[in-house]
Amino acid sequence: MLLRLALRLGRVGAIAVGAIGVAAALAQPLAFAQLAGNTPAERAVFAQQMEILARQLTYLLPLPGQLGTMAGWIEWRAIGALEVILAFWAVMAASGAGRGDEERGLVEHWLAQGVSRGSYIGSRIGGFALLGTVVVTLTLAAAGVGSALGKEPVPASALALQGIALVGLVLCSYAIALFAAQLVTTRRGAAALGGGALLVLYLIDVVARSDGAESIRGISPFWLYDQNHPLTNGGTLDGPKTIALYATGVIFTAAAAFAFVRRDLGAPLLRRPPHDVESTTLPAGDPFLRLPVLAILDQQRTSLLAWAVVLPALGVFFLSFTRTLVDTMLATPSFRVYMERAGLGNYTSFIGVTWFGTLVLLLSMYAIVQTSGWAADDQEGRLEVIASQPISRARIVVERLVALLAGTAIIVTAAGVALAIGARAADIAIDTGQLALGSALALGVVFAFGGLGAAGVSWRPRTTVIVLGAVAIASYLLQEFTPLFEWPTWVADLSLYALYGNPLSGTVDWARSAALFGIGAAGSAIAVAAMRQRDIGR
């Protein structure tokens, strides 16, 4: 019964991540068959050029091996990106199991029925382990099918060994995030702490890919996983490191289960000693808390500052290797064809598609994070407190969306200024007017996600975040694969990012941009109507 409950609670996230993994694992081998060439000489040139490209992408993908082969391409391009995606899923699932169940009253319900705490947390861990294994199995099976369709089948035994290592990474990430959830009191805090911990461990691995962090790289589960290359290393695993990966997962799982059994419901494992605080009837002295919209931004000032610093820094970092990257890709005949299809023939168009494509993806993640906060307000009782004030429910929706757009405008402005400065330093000519226009139109993507998120939260807050995440990933994959496989234009138009286009290159499709703002406006209208009618907390 409990295992069935755990599987039901985790099925939405598993389906979304599984669909992403299967789509990427199936498409990338087909892309390799088109790009790599057929003769040994063409494969050698392709591998050499891709090696240069891979060195520029170590912050996203692991170091490659044998890029002139289907197995090497799958290991690097198809499976490499799954590390981050699966770790993100593990964090969200662990925060739900570690704190979300308590916020929804599920733990209290089952404990009242005589279920022990150990049985409950054990079922949640077992349920995720089963779902994680299924997702990894389906993904690697899709990679095998893709390689067969590309007429270079990869041995099933090597894929199975890769799956053993990947399942170990997923379970270890889940265990770390589940333990982190025992140290805070809310699901939002659990996601932040668990995600932050895994981000630090991932950055250690990124540094280790450039022969750094030798003294501490062993503590990163991502580094332990990256040492396994069964697809390109004769079908063998690094036994000690794989065992260390699973052992770390077992240790953190046991610690999380022990903490869950020992702590009080709704309380963290470690509690500060009580201290006397002088009571007061005076309101807070922060003047921004009394102003509409600014009150929301004021409460998010730390995270907003982080977004406004990290995204510009990423933009400058991107520009630092843009010239080398574009020259390398244009020197490869197969990639030149792909870039011409995608309209990436010069530095400006490449920045417009690649960087701004990444920017709008990250901004949509920002919108999804804000949507997650709106859903948490509903589930944790804050929305009930806000609605009890003498304000209309429509105003709640409007203030949320205006605050989302205002925060995005701050982030986009900072990123645009940094990009202009970085382009000048890299000696790449960018029209500042087009840069400003592209930055402004990026608000349309955020408004579309925000409108859809507001509509979903006003109707089904518990599933909205997962659905929005699936929309974001599907939109990104459609935009990437349409020029590669020469799909019809209408397929690309299903992507919200394709509607954004490439304003930096000077081509603006105003009808598509208007469609983005129209989606946001329609979602906002639905959100206002739904918020007026629904019962809060359901």
Image (cartoon, grey):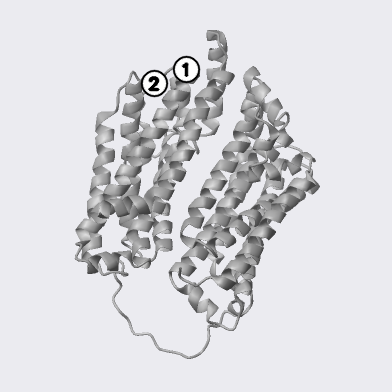
Q: Label 1's element?
A: loop
Q: Quadrant of residue 489?
A: top right
Whole-number angstrom distance, CA of label 2 to CA of label 1: 9 Å
User: x, y percentage for residue 537?
Assistant: 46, 70
Question: Seen in the image, is 292 located left or right of residue 275?
Answer: right
Q: Which mark is residue 232?
A: 2
Q: Amino acid at mark 1?
A: Thr
Above or below for 177 versus 526: above
- Nearer the observer, 300 or 375: 375
Residue receiving disc 1: 69
- Which residue is painted at 24% across and 58% down in the image? 120
**To which quarter of the image does residue 395 belong?**
bottom right
> Residue lying farthest bottom?
281
Residue depicted at x 39% and y 34%: 138
Q: Earlier in the sequence, mark 2 or mark 1?
A: 1
- Residue at the image point whose x is 41% and y is 45% from the top: 14
Q: Position of residue 343 (x, y in %)?
A: 72, 31
Q: Position of residue 268 (x, y in %)?
A: 31, 67
Query: Measuring 50% from the left and 24% from the top, which residue is drawn there?
Result: 29
